[in-house]
Amino acid sequence: MTSFIALRQASRRDASELAILADIASRGFASWLWFAGVENGVSDTPLERGRLKMSEEEAVGSWRDAVIAEAYGEVAGVAIGHALGEGIGDIEATIPATAPMLALQKTVVGSWFIGSLGVYRHLRGIGIGRRLLDDQIERADRRPVSLITASDNEAALSLYGRNGFLEAARADAVPLFENSKRHAWVLMTRSAA
């Protein structure tokens, strides 16, 4: 096994790394969302807003839900996951671009949901993503595991497919810009262990 990779629970001090890695995992979608914080004066940059979001004490998907992978003496990747409770049914999308993903999440209530899984590019291909994914499956505690990725993210689709995830549904992504590349959001699930 990849013994040179160490996993640890994130701490609040990791908020900056978490923001960067969540943005990498979302291929820039997170920073696009966080830009609203710049427009309304909450932060100076999208990543600063992401850092603030990741440092929140009680927020779902913040540092308390994150596991960090370290390799070669540095932070290498992150997985952020949580149990997807009934409360998601009460959430309404306030930003059109998030509506398709929220609708997909509402179909897998009760599963363990991996909201982000990202690895720095220079450390990919050595098992870090697989190690983080295995840890999330273990944390699911015999629940089904679900996640959403982009239909054009071939590396992610391959990793999840090799590890027992199957496509459960798709929803067309709302383009962020007029000339945005078109893709779909793919909901993938893995049966309970």
Image (tube, rainbow, N blue to C red):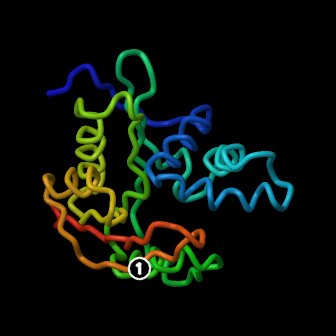
As drawn, is 132 to the left or to the right of 34?
A: left
Q: Amino acid at mark 1?
A: Asp
Q: Which quadrant would residue 97 be assigned to in this image?
A: bottom right
Residue that appears at 76% across and 57% down: 37
Return the residue found at the far front.
179
Residue that appears at 52% across and 55% down: 61
Return the residue found at the far right.
41
As drawn, is 130 to the left or to the right of 108?
A: left
The x and y percentages for residue 178 are 59, 73
Whether 24 is drawn above or below 181: the answer is above
Residue that appears at 80% across and 49% down: 43
- 5 or 47: nearer the viewer: 47
Q: Which residue is mark 1?
A: 172
- Image quadrant holding the C terminus, namely bottom left
Q: Which quadrant would residue 7 be assigned to in this image?
A: top left
- 145 or 83: nearer the viewer: 145
As drawn, is 112 to the left or to the right of 66?
A: left
Q: Residues within 10 Å of mark 1 (few under 14, many from 20)?
A: some
Whether 158 is drawn above or below 97: the answer is above
Q: Which quadrant would residue 120 be assigned to in this image?
A: top left
Q: How many marks?
A: 1
The x and y percentages for residue 95 are 63, 76
The x and y percentages for residue 57 are 64, 49
- 44 or 143: nearer the viewer: 44
Residue that appears at 81% across and 60% down: 39
Find numbered disc 1 in the image and state the secondary structure of the residue it sits on. strand
- Image quadrant holding the N terminus, namely top left
Whether 131 is drawn above or below 189: the answer is above
The x and y percentages for residue 100 are 46, 79
